[in-house]
Image (cartoon, rainbow, N blue to C red):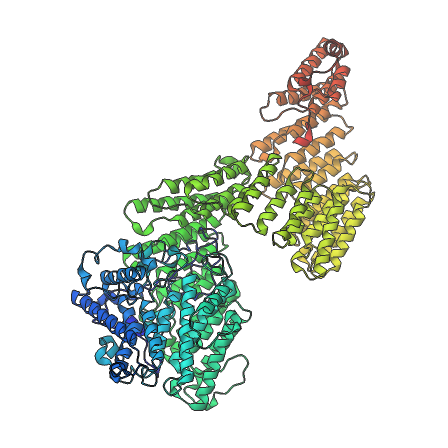
Amino acid sequence: MFQRRCTTCLTSWHQKVLSARSRRNYVGTWQPYTQTYPSSTCHPKSVSPPSSAIPTATSYNLWNHPRRHLSAVSHTAPSTLSIAGNAKPVSEAQRRSAQLELDQMSRSTSRLLAMNLDTEDSSTATSEAVVNEARVALHYWSRRWYMHFHPGFGRAAKGSTLSLGALRKWDKSNTDGGDSMGVVSDSIGSEESTKSDDVAASSIHNLSGDHGAQQAELLLDWSLSNNLVPHGIFDHSFDAKSHMGKEDKEGGNLGISPNLTFVNIIETYLLPTAYAGVGGGGGDDPATAHGSDGYNKLETLRSIHDQRNFATLAKHFTINSSYIRAVVDATRVMKKMKQLQSDFPDQLSSDALSLKAELNIWSKRAIILSKTQTGQGLVAGITKDGVANSRKLELLELEDACNIGGKIGDDAYTLLGCLNKMESIVSEAEERYISTKDERIRPSVDWYNHVLGAWARSDLEGALEKTKQILRGMEAYDNTLEESLANYNTDDGNLRQCWASPDTITYNSVLFCLTRDAGQNRAKEAEALLRNMKFRYEQTKNKDMRPDEVTYGAVLHALAQAGMAREAESFLDSLEDAEQDEAIVPSLTIYNTVLNAWANSSQRNAPKKADALLTRMKVLSSSGKNSSIEPDPISISTVISCHARSKTRQGAERGEQMLDEALAMYSEGNPRVKPDSIMFNCAITGWTNISGIESGEEALSSNVIPAERAEMLLRKMKETQLNVHPVAQTFNIILDCWAKSETKGAAERALKLMREMPDYGVAPDECSYNSVLHAMTKETNPKWVVIAEDMFQEMKEKVSISDITYHVMMNIYCKSSDSDGARKAEELLRNMEKEKLHPSQISYNICIDACARRGDHRKAESLLQEMLSLSDKGNAKCRPTIHSFASVVNALAKSGDVDAVARAKEVVCKVEELEYVSPNSILYNSLIDCIVKSRHNDNASSEAEEILLRMEQNHRAGNSNVRPNSYTYSMVMTCCARSKDPGSAERAERILMNMESLYAEGLSDAAANGRCYSAAISAWARSHSPNAVERTFALIDRMEKNGRDASPHGKPNAHCYNACIHAIAKSQKSGKAKKCRDVLQRMIAARDGGFRESAPSLITYSTIINACAFTHGDEEDQKEAFDLARTCFQTLLESSEIEPCASCFTNFFHVITRHLKHGAIRDQFAEAVFLEGCKRGKISKQVLHNFRKASPSVANRILSEHRILPEEWQNKIKNDGYKSY
C-alpha cells in the first residue's frame, strides 16, 4: 500500500482516503484489520507465529501472549483518531450520487468494451473523446470504486446498505452468468437492499473485493489491444478534475506519473495481503479468509490516525489462496507495466511510484517464500489443499492467461531470490538517478523501507546486519543533508550507501528484526536504538522520525521476551510521566505488553507484580485518567498465565479465581471482560503446571488432584452460557495434565477424556493421542502395552504421525515390564525410515535405554556403535549424546559381567576423546554405579573414591559439567559401605563431613542429604566395628539437629533410623532392646513433629524384632527384648497401613525360641502366631522351620493333619518381604 506522498509523484488515493481531513464524499470509520496468530498452548490450530510481521500498536506484544487469536485485537490506541470522529453522517443524496456514478461508469465501460477501434468504421475510430472516456473509466475502477464499494470500506465510504447491496448484486450477476460489470439497479432503498448485515454476511466470502481492479484490468487490456498508448491513454496531464470528486481535485498534481493506473490496480489487488484476505477473492476457507463470523470481521478493522500509522501496520495475515492469488494478480499487472515501459519509453517510463509498487510486490513474494512459512495449515507454508506456498505460487502463475514478459524467473520462487531482486531494483534506480539527476526517479525512503522490511521479516542468516547496514546508510545520508552531498561517498562496509533519510518506519523495521530473537542482549540493543532515534528527533525536530507507539511497543516487546519485567515497567512509568505534548499516551496494548513481561519473568514476585499492574489499570481507567486501558480479556488472561507459570497450587487457585471473577463481571453486564477459550485455557494450564510436582505436605494436605480440577474447568466452560467452546488445545492441556500426574489410574482417565472429545465436536489430534500414550508409560500393567499398540494403529488411520509419536510409543516399550520391549522399540526405530521419518539421537537413546533397563549391554553397545558410525558419515542428527554413553554404562552396570567395569571405563575414555561431546556428572555417576554393583572387584571403594577425586579436581579447574552432586557422594559412600576393607566406615564418614565443609565454604552446592547420611550409617552398621552403634547414634543426633536448625543437610528419615537399628542388631553388646526402643521412640517423635518420612515402616519393626531375637544378657535383658518384640509384632498385626511380611513371623518365632522357656506359655504364643500366619497366608518354609523349633509338640499336632500345606496358608508370600516396600 502507498504510505506517503512522493516528492515528485501523485499522492496515491490510499493516502487521500486515509487523510485526517474531513471529506464531503467520505465519512464513516475505517478500521484496518490486524490478525494475530494462535499459540501452541491456547488455540485449536497449534502453529508457530510467523516471523514475517512488523509489530504494531495493536499487535506487537501478542506473539508470546496467551490470547493469540483472531479477535485478540479489540481496542485502538488512544493516540489513534477515528476518521469518522468529526465527520457528518452519510446522507441519502450522497448515497444516490455514488450509485449514479457507479451506474454511469458501468454503462460507459460496457460501451467501451464493445468497441473495436481497429475497424475502418468511422463511428468507432479512435478519437480524443474515446480516449478521455477510457481514461476516466480506468481512473474510476482503479481508484474511486474502491473508496465507495470495497468490502473493506463498506462501512466507511457510503454505508453498509449501499455497499452490501451493490455486492449482493454483483454476486448474483456473477453467479447467474450475468454481466460481469455488475451494474447495480437504482433500487438502493428497496427492502432487498436494506436487509440486515447478518443476511449479507452469509455470502460475503463469495464477493470479490478486487472487482474494481478486475474491471480496470479489462479496460487496460482493451486499451492495449486497441493501441491507445500512443494516443495518450496514460497521459494524466489533461484537465480531468471535472470528472473527479472533491478529494481528487485536492490532490493538485494528478498527472505527474503515467504509471498511476497500473499502480492503483496493483495496490487494489494487493489489499488481501494487508487485511488478511478481507475483500479478496475467495480464500481457502471463509472462516479463515474473512473471519469466523463472516462480515463481522470487517467490523474488526481499526481506525488509524495518519499515514504513518497506516504505514507501520503489522502485516499479520493468513497465507492462504486469497493471499497468493492477490500476489499473482499484482505480478501480472506489474509484468504488463514493465513490458509497456519497454515498448513505449516515451509514454511510460519507470519512476519512483512504479518502482515502489514493484518493490511492494517483491516484498509480498518474499513473505510467501519465507522459511518461517513452512508450518502446516492455513496460517503458513502449506495451504488447505496441501500444496506448498512456493509451488502454489508457481502453478498459479503458470496457469495465468497473461504471457506478457514471459516467465518471471526461477529466482522469483526463493526468498533469497526475491531479496536480491529488490536490491537489484533499488541499485539500478540509484545508478540511474546518480547519472541523470532525474527527479522522477529520485530514491524514496519507501524504497529502502520495503527492502529493509523484507530483510527484517526474513529468517535468513545475516538479516539483522543487513537491516543495520541500510539504517546506517540512511542515517549517513541524513547527516550530509546540511553539508554538501559531494561528501557523501563512503566505502564503509558497515553501511549501505542510501539516498534517503530514515523515518519512523525505518527504525521500527530494524526494531522488529531485533526483537525476533529473545534475549537480554537483543532487548538492550533495542533500547539503545530507541535512544538514538530520540536523540536524532530532538536534534532535527523531524516528525517523520519521531518515535511512535509502535516504536515503544517494539522495545517493550523485546523486554517482555527477555523476561526483563522490571525494566519494562520502568519504561511504562517513564511514558506515563512524560510531558503530554511530546508523549505517547500508553495504550491498553502497551500495558498488556508489560503484563506479558511479568508473565515471562522468572522472578518469584512476578504474579504479585502482575496483579498490582492490573489493579493500577483498573484504577486509571475508572478514574478517567486513561479510560482506554480498562482491562480486557487479554489483560486478564495474561495475569492468569503469569500465575500459572509460578507452578504453585496458590497460583493455580488464583488463576481460577480470576476466571470466576471475569465470569461474574460479565454476568453483571460488563461485556468487555467476556471470558473466552483462551482465558479458560490459561486457567487450566495453571493446574497442568503443578501436576506431578506436588510434594510432601502440600500433596498430603489436599485431596484435590490437579487433573481433576482442570477437568472441572472444562465442564464449567461447557455449562456457561457464553457460547465458549473448548478446542483441541483445551483437551490437550488437560490430557497433558493427566500424563504428568502420579495419580493412580491417570492413563485410564486420560483415555476416557480423549474418547469424549467428539462429544464436544472436537477431533483428537496427534498431540491428544501422544499425551494419552505418555500417560501409559507410567503404567506397569501389561494390558496398557496392548492398548497403546491398538491406539498407535488407530493414529495411523486417523491422524498424521510424526517422530514424536514414535518416540512416545518406543518409550512405552522401554519402560514396560515386557522382556521383549527392547526388541519392539528397535523395530519401531527401523520402521521410522519406511514412514519417511528420520531417526534421531532421541530414537537411538530410547532404544539404548530400553536395553540398559534389561541389562542387554551387548545390544546397547551395538546401537551406540551404529550411532558413532552414522555420525562419522555426516549424519549429525544421529550423533550420540552424553545420555547415549551413560545408558550403555548403565547397561554394563546391570549386566553383572566380570569385565563390566573395564568396558565401562572404555566407554568413558571414548567420550573423553571425542570433540562433540564432553564427560559430565551423569556419565561419571553411571561409572561409579557400575563399580558399586560389581561383584568381582575387590578394589571397588578405592576406584570409586579415585573417580570422585578426579571429578572434584576437574570441577576446581573450571569444568562445571563434572561437578560432583549429592548422588555422586552417596554412591561412593555406598561403595565404602559394601567394602570389606578395614576403615571403610571411617572413609565414608570422612567423605560425609567433607561434603558439609565444602558446602559451608561455598565450594560446592551438593548438600549432604538423607541418602548420604544413610550410606554413612550403613557403612558403620556393616563394619563390625566395636564403635559402630555409637557412631550411628552420633550421625542420627546430627541429622536431628539439622532438622531442628532447618539445615540444608540431611534430616531424619526412616532409612537412616533403620540403618541404625541394623547396626544395633549386629552389635555384640548388651542392651540391644533398650537402644532399639530409643530409636523407635525417636522415629515416632520425629513423625509427630512433622517429619513424616521418619515414620516407622515395615522394615523398622521387622529389624527391631530381629535385633530382639539376638539380644544377649541376663534375664531382665531378655524379658525387655521379648516385650519390645511382642509390642512391635502386635503393632504390625493391628495396623491398617502396614501388612506384616513372612520375615516378621520368622523373626518372632526366633524371639519365642530365644527368650521364652519351654512350657504352656511358649506353646500358646507359638500356636497363636502360627494360626495368625495361616490366616494371612504368610507361612513360608522358613516360618514353618522356626515354628517347629519354637514348639515341636504344637507343630506336630497341627501339621499332622496336613500332608501338604493348604494353598491359603502360603498364598501371600509371593513378592513379600522388604523388596515390596
| Residue at (67% x, 29% y) in the render | 1099
Specify whether 371 is left or right of 930. Answer: left
Q: Position of residue 332 (x, y in %)?
A: 42, 73
Q: Is residue 523 visible?
A: no
Q: Residue furthest front?
A: 120
Q: Residue furthest left?
A: 93
Asked if 720 appears above or below 109 in the picture, the reply is above
Residue 308: percent from left, percent from top: 35, 72
| Residue 314: quadrant of the picture | bottom left
Locate the N terminus and report the quarter of the image it occupies: bottom left
Whether residue 565 is visible to the viewer of this picture, yes or no, is yes
Q: Identify the image quadrant of residue 1202.
A: top right
Q: How many marks?
A: 0
For residue 151, above or below residue 1081: below
Left-right relation of 48 to 862: left
Compare residues 417 and 721 and report the one nearer the observer.
417
Is residue 883 left or right of 1024 when viewed as pictured?
Answer: left
> Which quadrant does the C terminus fall into?
top right
- In the image, is residue 1180 above or below residue 1031? above
Q: Position of residue 369 (x, y in %)?
A: 49, 66
Front-most of residues 758 and 819? 758
Describe residue 237's horizontal placement relative to residue 190 as left or right: right
Percent from the top left, x then y, of residue 74?
A: 34, 57
Q: Is residue 105 above or below residue 871?
A: below
